[in-house]
Amino acid sequence: FRSRLELLQNKPELRNKLWDVVNALQNGLREKGFNIGNTESPVTPVFFSGNVAQGTNVLIDLRENYSIFCSIVVYPVIPKGFILLRLIPTTSHNIDDVNETLSAFSKIRSKLNDGTYKKIAEKLKMI
C-alpha cells in the first residue's frame, strides 16, 4: 500500500492518467443516461432497477462475456428494487477499456429492460 501511495505522490503523471480514465468513464456513463449519483472519487457507482437475482445475472454476464470485473451491492445495503454496480478504474486502464465498458453497460441495460436477466433467474429458479 505504501509504495502505491508514494507512486501517486511522486509521479503526478499517474494521478493525471487515472483522472483522465475516471473522467472519461464517468462522463461517458452520464452521457449515455446512466445514474452514477454524485461521486468525487475513482470509485464509480452505477445504479439500476432490479432485484438480487437479476443483479447476480448482470454481474455474471459482465464478468464472463465482457471481461469486466465490478462489485455488486444489493438489498439490504441499498433499497429493495435497486442494483448498484461499482467500477474502479485504475492507471492500467485506457480509453479503449472505457469504450468497451460503456458498450457493455449499454448492452446489459438493454437486457435488464427487456427482461433477459429476469427470465434467466426464473429458469434457474433464483426468484
Image (cartoon, helix red, strand yellow):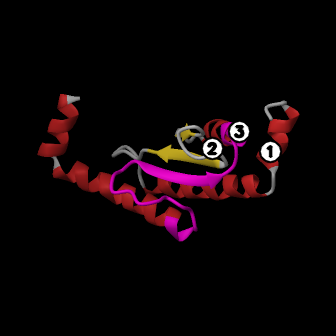
Residue 46 is covered by the magenta coloring: yes
Residue 6 coordinates in the image, percent (x, y):
14, 37
The residue positioned farthest toward the left in the image shown: 10
Q: Amino acid at mark 2?
A: Tyr
SS class, disc 3: helix
Sooner in the amino-acid sequence: mark 3 or mark 2: 3
Q: Amino acid at mark 3?
A: Asn
Q: Quadrant of residue 65?
A: top right
Q: Which mark is residue 85?
A: none
Which residue is labeled 1 in the image? 118
Residue that label 3 marks:
57
Residue 53 is drawn in which quadrant? top right
- In this image, 75 relative to 3: left or right? right
The residue under label 1 is which amino acid type? Answer: Lys
Left or right: where 67 falls relative to 109: left
Numbered label tally: 3
Q: Position of residue 46 (x, y in %)?
A: 53, 53
Residue at the image point whose x is 41% and y is 52% from the top:
94
Structural distance between the alpha carbons of marks 3 and 1: 8 Å
Q: Residue at x 36, y 50 (%)?
A: 42
Please state the extent of the stretch shown in magenta in the rendering: 30-56
Quarter of image, res 23: bottom left
